[in-house]
Image (cartoon, rainbow, N blue to C red):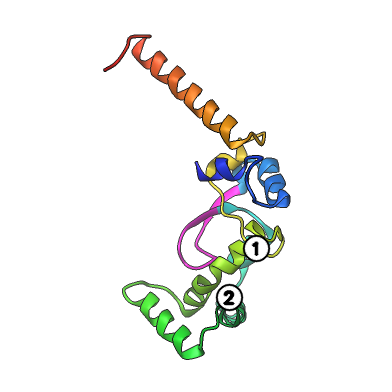
Amino acid sequence: MGTHFLLTSDSTVPDAVKARCLAAAVTDVTVTTAVDGLPHRMLRSELVDSLERSGRAVALLRAVRHAAAFRRLAGLSWPRMVRDGLAMRQGKALTWSQVLLAATTPMLLKASMVDGRTDTGVMASGQVAGVIGDLPSCAELVDRIMAEAAATLDRLTGGRTVG
């Protein structure tokens, strides 16, 4: 439901992101672990493709660069970043590049979902992005969902009142 509410006329998501989602086919939504080692469903983009193609050395270099930018933005020290990274690795089979990227995933999301820079960020998206064709208001979307739910219940119960 989150993606559908992002794709409403009331949503503050930048128009560039809405346009990319509306233009997407179902096959343009992918699940990847290349961003930070954890599975994320997102819209395929040049950045996602690049992350999936890059080797360990390139991924580590990119991760360090993003971590340095995140450290400055968040006002964290390198020792604090290392402590947080060690805590993240505890009990998980994450590489250091994945740990570093996990710290910057919010920046990659912000670049697209807040700043509208679809070329430099990642766009979180549910599977539904490939089938949405309009931008209703939130009220219209809720009304549509309620009407579809009522019709489904009516169809399942044969019009009988349940309860």
Specify the farthest residue to the bottom: 79
- Give the residue at mark 2: 59
User: Residue at position x 58%, y 74% from top?
Assistant: 55
Type of the residue with mark 1: Gly
User: Residue at position x 44%, y 24% from top?
Assistant: 149
Q: Distance between the residues labelled 2 and 1?
A: 15 Å
Does 98 appear above or below 135?
A: below
Q: How crowded is mark 1: few (under 14 residues within 10 Å), some or many (20 or more)?
A: many
Does 29 appear above or below 138?
A: below
- Give the residue at mark 1: 121
User: Residue at position x 49%, y 23% from top?
Assistant: 148
- Toward the viewer: 75 or 104? 75
| Position in image of residue 13 (x %, y %) | 65, 51
Can you tell which quarter of the image residue 75 is in?
bottom right
| Position in image of residue 56 (x %, y %) | 55, 77
Type of the residue with mark 2: Ala
Does 136 appear above or below 79?
A: above
| Position in image of residue 105 (x %, y %) | 54, 67
Q: Quadrant of the C terminus?
A: top left
Q: Does the magenta stretch include residue 155?
A: no
Can you tell which quarter of the image residue 94 is in?
bottom left
- Toward the viewer: 68 or 145? 145
Stretch of the chain drawn in magenta: 29-41
- Toward the viewer: 30 or 140? 140
Question: Helix, strand or loop at disc 1?
Answer: loop
| Position in image of residue 71 (x %, y %) | 56, 82
Q: Is residue 37 magenta?
A: yes
